[in-house]
Amino acid sequence: MGVEVNKIKQFISKKKEDTASKEQNDLTKEVSSTSQDRSKVALIISILTVVLVCILFFGLNQNLKGLSQEVSKLNSLSSKVATLDSQLQQLSDQTAKQVSTINTQLSSLSDKVAELEKLPQKTKNMIIANMLQQMAAKTKYLSTQVQDQEQATKLIQIQEMLNQLQVEISGQ
């Protein structure tokens, strides 16, 4: 009986070992399949991450191109504004010079008018008569230079009127 008990004990221990080994194999298979599933998930996640990074890169690249184009347009506009500003400054300077010249001429004219007002009426009449005589002479000359007879006739009439006016003013 001792041998049979030993055999039974060996059989039981062998069964226990087989069961433990089977359980160990099942556990190992589950761990390895779980590891394979995790590695597949990790691979998919990494591929999606790479795709997402590519999409973000190209999107940012397009935004940067658009931004650089806008900056170049702004630089172009800035140079145009600077050019217009310099032109405006030149026009302002020219206008100031012209206004200054006109003011000088106006003051000169005012001085001449003031001097003319100081002259007695007879002197004024003499100056006016002299001017009318000069105008009549110029009108006579112009009447010889025009080619249209009608215009020449009108100029001669104007000359006669100027001569009459000169006589009237000289008589005063």
Image (cartoon, grey):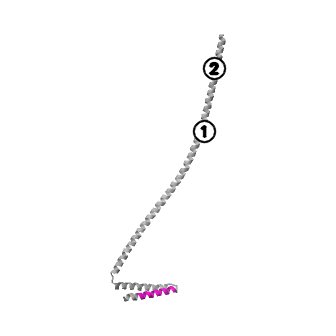
- Label 2 and label 1: CA atoms lie apart by 41 Å
Name the residue rendered at 35%, 76% in the picture: 111
Q: How many marks?
A: 2
User: Is residue 151 in the magenta section?
Assistant: yes
**Residue located beneath label 1 in the image:** 44
x, y (%) of residue 87? Answer: 45, 64
Numbered circle sitting on residue 117: none
Task: Answer with left or right where residue 157 lies relative to residue 105.
Answer: right
Q: Nearer the viewer, residue 96 or 137?
A: 96
Name the residue rendered at 36%, 76% in the picture: 110
Q: Nearer the viewer, residue 85 or 19?
A: 19
Task: Answer with left or right where residue 4 lies relative to residue 66.
Answer: right
**Vertical side of 57 occupied by 99: above or below:** below
Numbered circle sitting on residue 16: 2
**Vertical side of 80 occupied by 37: above or below:** above
**Vertical side of 96 occupied by 142: above or below:** below
User: Is residue 153 in the magenta section?
Assistant: yes
Q: Amino acid at mark 2?
A: Lys
Which one is in front in this view, the residue at disc 2 or the one at disc 1? 2
The magenta stretch is: 150-165
Name the residue rendered at 64%, 24% in the picture: 22
Circle 2 Cα neighbour tier, 10 Å, few/some/many (<14 / 14–19 / ≥20): few
